[in-house]
Each structure stands twice: as structure tokens, then as C-alpha cells.
Image (spheres, rainbow, N blue to C red):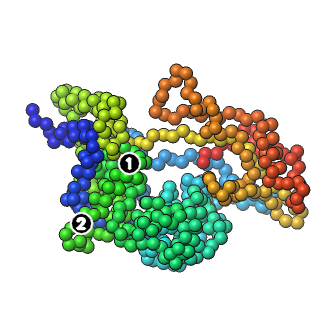
Amino acid sequence: PSKSNGMEMLEKWIEHDHHSYHLDFLSPTQAYKIRIALVEWYRANRRKLPWRGDAGPYDGSTIGYAASGTAGGKATGNKKRKEQGNDIRSFFADSSSSGKKKRRAGESKVPSEESGEMQNDSKMDLQAVVSNVPREVTAYGVWVSEIMLQQTRVEAVIPYYLKWMQKFPTVHCLANATDEEVNSHWAGLGFYRRARFLHAGAKRVVNDYNGIVPTTVEELLKVEGIGPYTASAVASIAHGVEVPVVDGNVCRVLSRLTGIANHIKAGVLKDDLGWTLAERIIKAKSGGGGEMDGSPGEVNQALMELGATYCSPAGSGVDDGDPLKEFYVSTRLGMAIGEAMHNSSSSVSGQVESLIANKAFVANEKGDQCRLCDPKGISTAYYDIMDRMNADLSTDSKTNAKRIYAIAGHASLPIPPPKKSKREEVIAVAVISLQPSDSERCWLMVKRPSKGLLAGQWEFPSVCVWNSANDGELKTKKKGEKASGKPAAVEVPLIDPTVRSDALDSFLSDIYPSDGDLPSIDLNKRAQVKDAPVVHIF
């Protein structure tokens, strides 16, 4: 009997061994249709954001998009954050009843590095700030926003961006600022290395380019802190240069548009062939280059916007608001697998299983492989689709089966990235204070090294007394232990209090000489703050 279109497509996906398979889904005609759909949707639905030249109010939230895309009961959105401990500022609060200040209802706690939420005492009247921020798209504004948006949510960046642009409205203003001024306006946003590079980059632009942000990708790449992604974003959005922009969101869209069975952090996707795929959409135009084609900046922002909204990890691929729902290979693969597995003929499902088994064998034998797909990506995605379908079919009797198949296929691409072992450290921290009779209490702080994590930031004196990365036992696999795909669990040892004390004594002696003008420290007057170690997840 003749094969169905779905079965034929499924066989080609499983058996393909060259990346041209994925490129074929973005032929000039198809890529142009995708471009037109993206531009039309973006112009009608894009979020209002200050770096896009919009007037307030702003809303960077993506809540409400693609809420139905949790196939197989596996929520693919961000996990609910664990309850944080008490506000660290309470540690420094005046212990007297008159000095205590309760946190008002709804007032947030000190933000984590990851959260990017502004501290309450540094929040400002946004409306007053908005009036002072230029309502135009500038290369400097795009540059600042792209750096801030790295690993930080849009809604968290908006107030920081407004505050930053009010304080440093031009490249010259930023270049002339002190390190302390830059850090104070970045405080709470996290990943401070970005601020240092942005500051250094501004100095480069002033010194080498007369304060004018370069217009080409080649020149932008010479500026500190600007890589291929940021250079392409600034060039395309601010100057209309016809270059693609590829980030994690775009990689997700491309994976689902062309059936790539790999994770979005794979180098071949985010740094290599992913740019070739995105370029096909950027360069797809009508002969006359009409208004409906959109500018390169619009197309790039539309791809990123879609990846953050309807094509987020929780995206369903079948939502009526998704402009590319007719183009996703992921949903078609899901339907093809679903129909094959639930075909009345057992030979059809057996044939698919045989193809998957053969694909796994070829991967193990290092045979010809598609560069874009992970060697085990096809089988990983296939079995994930099966798991999601079976879970939903067993619990949801109301939803159309084909819709369940499509959502399962969409949710299984791209595949999850491999998990890395977490680095664990045991750090001894000294909290030293001085209470002069005529002034407020002072705290001893030290500045971190100029390079590395939180470079140049201030902290309590501390010294690392154990690090999992340097622990020899973790690097040696035990005899008879089997490799599992999961990172090995790290057992953090309990460090003897004497070891911690001696390490701190040595460190304090180095940074706080006894023969100086500073008040002397009596190391014997110390107390353990807590009976058990304090755990901090960074």
C-alpha cells in the first residue's frame, strides 16, 4: 500500500543524514511567506518597550501566551522559584524597637542575581524617568538594552534601562562615568561583568570612533563586550543592515520550523548553521522590496519576540495567535508519529520503531550524521513525543487527538540540553563591625578581584575552604560505576570549625595589618551566627 504523506515525512526526518534536509524547509518561497507572516504579526502585537522608541506604559511580560503548551503534563515554563529566606537587610537593622522598620505588604525582598528585580529602596517614579528618556531607536540604546537583556527577563530590565538612560543618556556620559557610578546603576540586575564590558566598550567608542557607535558588524565586534549576536542586533535594528540575529529564542523557532533535533545551546545551531537558517528568512524579499517585507530589524525582533511568546518552551504550536502555526515541522512530526502509533495496522508502528532503532545504531557506529541534529537527537525527540502523547491521551478525553499529537511534537523540539554538574563551595565568612560611640555602626567590606565572578564588587571578608571542582574524588569514577547521562551528585563535606577559623585568621591578617591606622580586631571575640552552615544557591 502507498504511504501517507505523514509517514513519508516521518521516514525522511528519521533517516536524513545531512543538514540540507533542514535548509530545504526554508526555500526562498517558504522563507518569504514566513517573513511576511512574522512582520504582519509583529507590527500588530509587539510589546511596547523603551528601547524600541515607544512611549509608556511598558509591559515586557509574556504571561498569557501559549498557556496550553504543556503536553504530557510536563510544564515547560520556568519553575516556580523557591521561597527565599529573610531579607538580608534585616541583619543590619537597628535592633532597637524604634529602629525596626517592617516591610510593607507587597514589598519585595532583596533580589537574587537571577531575578533581576530592583531593590525597593532604589525604585523610582517610572513616569518621571520615562519623560526624560528619548523616544527613538538609537544604536546606543539598542546596545544597552541587548546587554541588559542577556540572561535577564524583559520586564525586569525595563526600570533599569530607564534609570540607566536617564543617568547615562549618551556614550560620552557613560564613558566619563566612574566605576562606582556604573555599578550603582547596575546594582541588583546581576551578572556585573556585563556592566564592566559596557563601560569599557563606551570608552572604546569615544576614543576610537569619536563617540559614534559603529554601523557595521565588523566594526562593532571590535568593541569590548560585543559579540556576534549583539553586533548583529545593533546593526540590523539601529542601522537596517541585512544580517540575521540568533539567540536562544530564535534557535527554538528554527528548531521547530525545520525539525532540528538538538538543544538550543548546541554550538552548531547557535554559532554556525543556525545563522545560515535565519539568514534565509532575513534575505527573503519580494522583487520590489515592498513595505510589507519589513526591515531587517523588524524581522529579527519578530523572530525573537515569537520565541519569547508563542514559541516559548511552553508554546503549543497550534495557538490561533501564533503567526507560524502553519509552518512548524514540529507539529507535523507529532501528528505523523501519533497517526503511525495509533494506526490500525501494527506493521506501520513496527516500521517506525525499526527506523528509530536503526538510527540509534548508526549514531553509535559514527556513521553519516546531520550536523544540525544531535547524534541521539532523533530518538530522544521521538520517545519524548511518545511519552507526552500517551500521558495526555490517558488523562484528556476531550481534546482532539490530532491536537494532542501536534502539541507533543512541538513540545519535544528542541531537545533538552545536557545537564552540567553544579559547582559547590564551602566558604568561611567573617562579619566584622565597629560601633563608634558618636556614629552609626560600620561594617568591614573587601573588594573582590578585578576578574571573575562578581568582579570588583564589595563583600564581607571570606575565604573558600573547599571546592567541588578541586576535589580529587569527584574526578575519579568509582570501580564498577556506570555512566548515566546525569551529573554526579556532589557530597559537600562538613568542614571542621578549626579549619574555617584558621583560614579566616590568615586571610584577615593579610588584608587587615595590625600595625596600621585602622582599629584593631580581637579575633577571640567571635561567635558562630548559626549552628549549621548557611546554604546559598547562586
Closer to viewer: mark 2 or mark 1: 1
Give 393 or 19, whichever is nearer the viewer. Answer: 19
In the rendered image of this protein, does residue 246 appear above or below residue 217?
A: above
Earlier residue among tags 2 and 1: 1
Q: Secondary structure at mark 2?
A: loop
Mark 2 crowd level (few <14, some 14–19, many ≥20, 10 Å Cα): many
Q: Quadrant of residue 138?
A: bottom left
In the picture, measured across the screen, residue 405 lies left or right of residue 475, that is left
What kind of residue is marked 2?
Lys
Q: Residue at x 40, y 64 (%)?
A: 232
Q: Picture coordinates of residue 374 (x, y %)?
A: 36, 40
Q: Picture coordinates of residue 48 (x, y %)?
A: 42, 68
Give 130 or 198, whichever is nearer the viewer. Answer: 198
Q: Residue at x 63, y 65 (%)?
A: 183
Give 70 or 517, whichever is nearer the viewer. Answer: 517
| Residue 71 seen in the figure | no
Q: Cβ–Cβ below 8 Å for labels 2 and 1?
A: no
Residue that carries the numbered disc 1 in the rendered image: 268
Q: Tell me the distance, in whole angstroms, between the alpha carbons under discs 2 and 1.
A: 26 Å
Mark 1 crowd level (few <14, some 14–19, many ≥20, 10 Å Cα): some
Q: Picture coordinates of residue 210 (x, y %)?
A: 52, 78
Q: Secondary structure at mark 1?
A: helix
Check the picture and name the quadrant holding the N terminus. top left
Q: Residue at x 58, y 67 (%)?
A: 199
Residue that carries the numbered disc 2 in the rendered image: 285
Q: Quadrant of residue 464?
A: top right
Q: Residue at x 37, y 49 (%)?
A: 269
In the picture, measured across the screen, residue 151 lies left or right of residue 8, that is right
What kind of residue is marked 1?
Val
Q: Picture coordinates of residue 510 (x, y %)?
A: 81, 51
